[in-house]
């Protein structure tokens, strides 16, 4: 079930925060990890370009 949830999140552009934390611990132990809110905002900006504009 967790694999299904992970796949669904990735399909809509919500990467896994736990995977990010594991990556940071393994490869960048000297750098602080982003909070969940910072991580989510960072991924949204990366996916949508940061400047979400509306036409109306």
Image (spheres, rainbow, N blue to C red):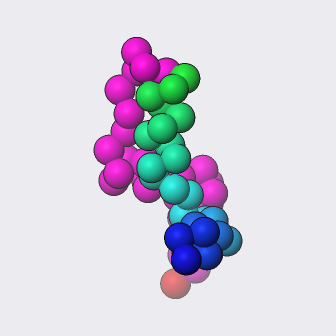
Instruction: Inspect this view and state whether residue 17 appears.
Output: yes
Residue 1 vs 46, above or below: the answer is below
Residue under the image location 53 percent in, 70 percent down: 2
Residue 31 vs 51, above or below: the answer is above
What are the residue bounds of the magenta stretch? 28-55
Residue placed furthest toward the bottom: 56
Q: Give yes or no for residue 51 being in the magenta stretch.
A: yes
Tell me residue 8's x, y (percent).
61, 75
Where is residue 53, by image quadrant?
A: bottom right
Residue under the image location 56 percent in, 57 percent down: 15
Residue under the image location 52 percent in, 84 percent down: 56
Side (left or right) of 9 relative to 40: right
Tell me residue 1's x, y (percent).
55, 77
What is the total number of numbered labels drawn onto the structure image?
Answer: 0
Side (left or right) of 33 relative to 3: left
Residue under the image location 49 percent in, 21 percent down: 28
Residue placed furthest toward the top: 30
Tell me residue 16's x, y (percent).
51, 56
Q: Give yes or no for residue 10 being in the magenta stretch.
A: no
Instruction: Inspect this view and state whether residue 50 appears.
Output: no
Tell me residue 46's x, y (percent).
60, 50
Residue 40 vs 38, above or below: the answer is below
């Amino acid at each position: 079930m967790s694999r299904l949830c992970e796949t669904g999140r990735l399909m809509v552009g919500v990467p896994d925060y736990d995977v990010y934390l594991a990556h940071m611990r393994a490869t960048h132990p000297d750098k602080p990890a982003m909070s969940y809110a910072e991580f989510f905002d960072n991924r949204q900006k990366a996916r949508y370009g940061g400047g979400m504009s509306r036409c109306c």
